[in-house]
Amino acid sequence: MSDVDDEDDEELDGGGVAGAPNDAADPSGIVDAAIPHDIRDRYEIHSYRGAAMILSRAHPTHCAELMDALRQFSITTHMIRTAGGNESDIPKLLSTSLRPQGWHETAIHGDLLVRLDWREQVGLKRSGKPIIEKRRQELRRERFLDGHKIDYVKGKVAFDLEWNSKDQTFDRDLYAFSAFATCGVIDVAVLVTRSASLNPVFRKLGPALRKDGQPETTKKGTVRQTASKYGASTTWMGKLLYRLNAGRNGACPVLAVGITPRCIKDWTDDEGA
């Protein structure tokens, strides 16, 4: 959930990027039936492995809490422009909504116990028939799962936000979702990130700002533009869809949610035109 200071000024394209969900994703009609219209109007949403239906039908209370948190989520252009350090003000908005309702940062730890069973000949009877006995061997692998962490877990639902981290953070998140799901700890996960539709906004916001409100400068001494903070190697929907299309979420159903310009309270469609 941390910001990154990325000097790269690439456009958001190139290798490892998906322009759209592939056949691994659920049909859009499933999302339309499961996710409220006002949420779909503000966010880009894609469902994998039936995530939208599992969340809305099997966990309606948790779903309602997440939908309310997304309704309340509203950012400003100043937040977008301002450096965040380890965690910007943007992820904190969701913490304010979810922590009081019991959504906790949760880590999973576990040992692996493997039992091998076989039948073994241990001798012969007087009749010449073999004497067969059952055998068992137990193998234990300590710390088979060790510390995979999800920022928000309640009941059997997981939630996380990646606003502007290095894109490899998605691999960590999806592996954690898969580990939790394989162990039966969660049924579904929701992962929020930036939609590519924010890119035109970034390009129009001018200089990036330091915490003290002054313009940021690059190592070369030039004024750094806001768009350069949100480069090709950071967390955004194209990088997430690429991984979900490839099945990196394993057996875990995942609802991918993209933050769009409609979540910016001091930005209008006219400004984005």
Image (tube, rainbow, N blue to C red):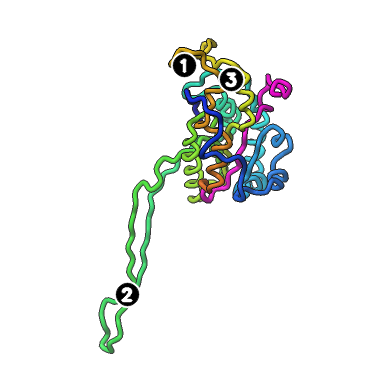
Q: Residue 79 carries which label?
A: 3
36 and 66: which one is in front? 36
Spatial CA distance of label 2 from label 3 is 70 Å
Q: Which of the numbered marks, if any, corresponds to residue 67?
A: none
Is residue 266 magenta-colored? yes
Query: Which residue is under mark 2?
Result: 133
Q: Nearer the viewer, residue 84 or 228?
A: 228
What residue is rendered at 57% in x and 37% in y?
238
Q: Earlier in the sequence, mark 1 or mark 3?
A: 3
Tell me which segment is drawn in magenta: 250-273
Q: Residues within 10 Å of mark 3 (few under 14, many from 20)?
A: some
Secondary element type, mark 1:
loop
Quarter in which the C terminus is drawn: top right
The image shows residue 28 at horizontal and vertical percentages of 69, 45
Say which element carries label 2: strand
Q: Is residue 22 magenta?
A: no
Name which residue type carries label 1: Thr
Q: Distance between the residues labelled 1 and 2?
A: 74 Å
Q: Nearer the viewer, residue 153 or 43?
A: 43
The answer to whether residue 154 of the structure is visible from this angle is no
Distance of label 1 from label 3 (alpha carbons): 19 Å
Question: Badge 1 is on which residue?
Answer: 218
Work out whether 118 lies above or below 42.
below
Identified by mark 2, the residue type is Glu
Q: Which amino acid does label 3 sit on?
A: Met
Residue 155 pos. (x, y %): 56, 43
